[in-house]
Image (cartoon, coloured by chain):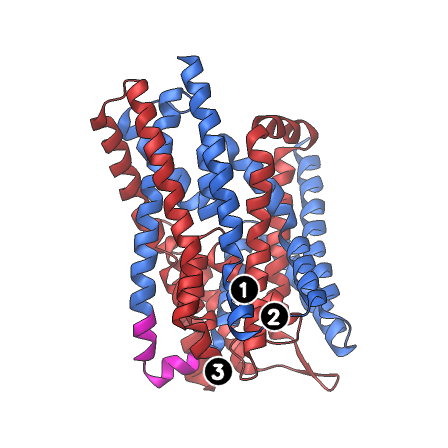
Amino acid sequence: MIDKAMEFNAKAIKIGTITMIAGVIANFIPVTYLYVAYGIIPPIADILKVWTVAAITFGVSWIIQPITFFSLMGVSGTYIGWLAGSCADIRCPAVAMAQKAAGVEPGTPEGDVISTIGLAGSIFMSVSVITFFILVGMNFIEMLPPFIKISFKYILPAVFGAVYVQLAGKHLSVGAMTIIAGFAIAVIFKTMALPAWIMNILIIFSGMLIARIKFVRDAKEKA
Amino acid sequence: MDLNSIANSPGLWIASSVMVIVVLLQSVIYLREALRQAKVLDISRKRCIAGMRSAMITALGPSLSPIIVAFALIAIVGAPTAWMRMNDIGAARTEIAMITLATQVIGMTPQSPDFSIMGYSYALWGMALNNMGWMIVTLLLAPNMTKYVAKLNVKYDPAWIKYLLSGATVGLFAFLLSNALIQVKNNVLVLDPGTWCAAITAAISMLIISKVFSKHQRLQEVALGISMLVGMFAATAMFG
């Protein structure tokens, strides 16, 4: 029985590796199409700059998130979750409920099989829902009254303001201090016309630094 | 060719569909393998179906919650890209953040009148390069993941890792927010009242939903979408 479970595990890694490589290729098809069909591509130097900005901003998440979610997601879940996303809010609850409904224990060979079945089910559901609403939304946007179309220009500040409060709500003092630091750095950089990407890095690092200070302080208080 | 017709062209739909097909295919292959293994382990077909059904019902609610923000993504980069990126790795807010970061490299802002097809290509590259990060890390680490989990837990305090990740995310959105709100023209600070109004009313709306209505779980799931609309409409009503 143990051998069978190992075999399933090895197969899950093989399927995951092949499909993930396909995913990496699929990921670049739109930008390739844009280049082939219309000849539009940023200069290589700028692509590297975009990559650097992405790595500095999300690099920690790229590495840490798949590792920290592994114990919840399992092997097949890791490949499915980091290709299709929504690990915390869709995949994990779906796995938990699938195992509960089928009456299997997590971490057992039976649990792994049911978790894989549940993950596949959650993908079929989320892809159908998103596809349906994108098709509806696309046609819907054309028919919107002018007032709403004008309001589109405020999408970004509205999203950023709301997301900030959502994030800062969990660590109020970190959130308050980071936004103050952010405003101060932004005023200095913009009035002196300093490069925006350095400003980007600086504000993100100030967020990490403030989190570190808060963490050390909390640890001391507990001790 | 203008941006809108390229961003919503049939060619781009086809190019974007490849990722969605890969996502679906991966699950179909895994499902087939799992059902075969279920037979080996003597798990009845009935229990497999019960598990699958339960997972699908569970996935329905959280799949609906990013829909309003997905509409915003359609307005910013067109329907095909929104469709592809909502179906792959990266939450809607991560994609919007990355679009803003990438287009900033050539000094453009999505939704502004000067946003061109070139700016759009920066946005697409940004999302592709960012999403590749998670995929490559998974490809490299997943086969020996148990080893890395143990290493990470020995080397670093898990509580600190959590703080570090939230510090980085708070820092990112502090940057995006201050970058949107603090505008300078000819070395002089120019604060656009509409932009400030949108950010502040959306923030207040989020605060109210998360504090006053904290018991309503369904409402929390769509809190970002509702707050975004409140901010957008308030700003448009007051400042046009």
Mark 1 chain: A
- Say which residue appears at 34% left-offset and 75% top-offset: A141
- Say which residue appears at 38% left-offset and 53% top-offset: B221
Q: Is residue A149 visible?
A: yes
Q: Earlier in the sequence, mark 1 or mark 2?
A: 1
* Residue under numbered circle 3: B2
In the visual, does A79 lie left or right of B176?
A: left
Q: Position of residue A65 (x, y in %)?
A: 56, 42
Q: Which mark is residue A31?
A: 1
Examine the image and state in which quarter residue A145 appears. Answer: bottom left
Residue B72 colored in magenta in the image: no
Q: Colour of chain B?
A: red
Q: Quadrant of the N terminus of chain A?
A: top left
In the visual, does A215 lie left or right of B88?
A: right
* Residue under numbered circle 2: A41
| A57 vs A21, nearest the viewer | A21
Q: Badge 1: how crowded within 10 Å, few (<14), some, or many (20+)?
A: many
Compute the Cα span from label 1 to label 2.
8 Å
Q: Position of residue A157 (x, y in %)?
A: 53, 71
Task: Magenta stretch: give its range.
Answer: A138-151
Q: Main secondary structure of the magenta part?
A: helix
